[in-house]
Amino acid sequence: SAVISQKPSRDICQRGTSLTIQCQVDSQVTMMFWYRQQPGQSLTLIATANQGSEATYESGFVIDKFPISRPNLTFSTLTVSNMSPEDSSIYLCSVEFGQGASYEQYFGPGTRLTVT
Amino acid sequence: AQSVTQPDIHITVSEGASLELRCNYSYGATPYLFWYVQSPGQGLQLLLKYFSGDTLVQGIKGFEAEFKRSQSSFNLRKPSVHWSDAAEYFCAVADTGGFKTIFGAGTRLFVKA
């Protein structure tokens, strides 16, 4: 299992500014995932972050807007850059363990971002 | 490309009544399927998962789900709903190559006394 913490838990930001969200896991993991959950919507994968390499972004998401760092096997950050009200969402980090029947995916509590 | 459809945006059931939440998927092979629950202000919690074998899967909190390949469905059931079950429920399918999980739109469950 894994315990994931995120900082901050919520923030209100002005448009045009940037916010960096931190994700800490209590065990070492190869891949970490960042998701966005817009108000009333489902989760959408932003990118996959491996330690020591650049993150892999999903269609519709770019590194300039959502730069990700992965300095070690237990930590990652997601920055939401040049924010606009459309970026108001919950941002969640996630990790996975195992394969097949032992596969588990765990999610952090999320960071609720409001852009004014 | 894989996808997940949850046809019901919201469902209301009476406490003690049975529950079924629908989920249909599109995937080229046998998928890895999941149900998650998200309570207000809480993170996502895995209820159950299906990888192979027995098509009826038991999960936590008294939930179960049945994988029906012929219908491309993975419906979630509970025989008797409790008020604490009110939450958002997400069905998800994983890419067996990279475990990139795709989520359905979610079904919000309301429980009335």
Image (cartoon, coloured by chain):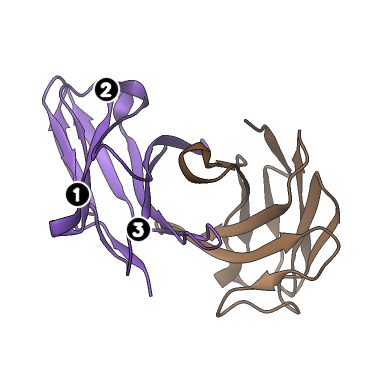
Chain colours: A brown, B purple
Q: Which residue is mark 1?
A: B22
Q: Quadrant of residue B46?
A: top left
Q: Earlier in the sequence, mark 3 or mark 1?
A: 1
Residue A111 position (above or below residue B54): below
Lateral position of residue B76 relative to residue A52, left or right: left
- CA gap, disc 2 to disc 3? 23 Å
In the picture, which quadrant includes the N terminus of chain B? bottom left
Lateral position of residue A114 relative to residue A29, left or right: left
- Which residue corresponds to the image point at 29% horizontal and 45% vertical from the top-left? B108
x and y percent of residue A38 in the render? 49, 61
Lateral position of residue B51 relative to residue A53, left or right: left
Looking at the rendered structure, the kind of residue marked 2 is: Trp
For residue B104, which numbered disc appears in the image? Answer: 3
Q: Quadrant of residue A39?
A: bottom left
Q: Quadrant of residue A78?
A: bottom right
In the picture, which quadrant includes the C terminus of chain B? top left
For residue B83, which numbered disc appears in the image? Answer: 2
The subunit letter for the residue under badge 1 reads B
Task: Give the structural element (helix, strand or loop) at label 2.
Answer: helix
The subunit letter for the residue under badge 2 reads B
